[in-house]
């Protein structure tokens, strides 16, 4: 089937099987360099995208559901002030995710602080687990998200 949708603000179309995974199509047909796929079962978070405004694992989205929707990957934030807030928040925390998880952790942070610049601690602790990582401290990631939220509040004068 031919699937037309909006990817990072641009109209795209691609021929794909209805059951094909969005993550596969992003990687192999639309050359989204940040896209990674690990578990392919919705457990690791390496394939996160913002789909219709919600952060989801793209390996769990079949292409027939993508028709007419809006999808954002980290590439959609390049050059934006939103991304700068997150980079500053991460830097001020000394938080440096590896190449493998930098994109999903950054996109996840963007989704969290765009929804609420003052994320509630209980929700934050659940949301931050969406990206599996055994090599950095979970608390360190939480602190980086809090600092990114601070940067966002300060830039938007949401003090
Ligand atoms: S590859 Fe999609 S959640 Fe693991
Ligand atoms: S997987 Fe990237 S820092 Fe752990």
Image (cartoon, helix red, strand yellow):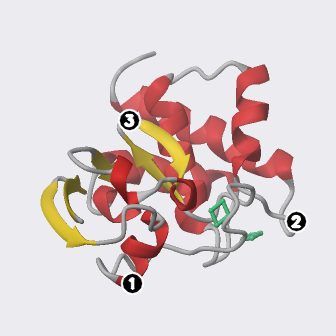
> Horizontally, is 59 left or right of 77 in the view?
right
In front of the other: label 3 or label 2? 3
Q: Earlier in the sequence, mark 1 or mark 3?
A: 1
Circle 3 residue: 53
User: Where on the picture, by quarter, is residue 42?
Assistant: bottom right
Within the displayed image, which quadrant is ligand 2 positioned in?
bottom right
Q: Residue at x 72, y 24 (%)?
A: 123
User: Is the distance from the Cβ of mark 1 to the nearest ligand 1 atom less than 8 Å?
Assistant: no
Q: Which residue is mark 1?
A: 28
- Residue 88 seen: no
Where does residue 24 sit, x and y in percent of width and height?
Answer: 46, 74
Q: Circle 3: is it few (<14), some (14-19), or many (20+) Cα within 10 Å?
A: some
Q: Are marks 1 and 3 in contact (CB under 8 Å)?
A: no
Q: Nearer the viewer, residue 150 or 65?
A: 65
- Residue 134's mark? 2
The residue mark sitting in front, 2 or 1, is 1
Badge 2: few (under 14), some or many (20 or more) residues near its Cα, within 10 Å?
few
From the top left corner, tell me how far across and down residue 51 is, in percent: 40, 44
């Amino acid at each position: 089937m031919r699937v037309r949708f909006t990817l990072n603000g641009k109209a795209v179309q691609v021929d794909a099987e209805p059951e094909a995974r969005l993550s596969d199509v992003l990687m192999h047909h639309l050359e989204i360099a940040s896209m990674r796929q690990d578990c392919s079962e919705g457990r690791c978070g390496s394939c996160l995208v913002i789909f219709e405004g919600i952060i989801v694992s793209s390996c769990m989205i079949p292409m027939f559901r993508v028709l007419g929707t809006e999808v954002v990957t980290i590439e959609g934030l390049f050059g934006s002030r939103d991304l700068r807030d997150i980079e500053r928040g991460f830097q001020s925390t000394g938080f440096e995710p590896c190449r493998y998880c930098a994109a999903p952790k950054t996109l996840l942070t963007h989704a969290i602080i765009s929804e609420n610049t003052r994320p509630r601690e209980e929700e934050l602790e659940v949301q931050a687990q969406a990206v599996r990582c055994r090599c950095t401290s979970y608390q360190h990631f939480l602190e980086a998200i809090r600092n990114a939220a601070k940067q966002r509040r300060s830039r938007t004068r949401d003090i």
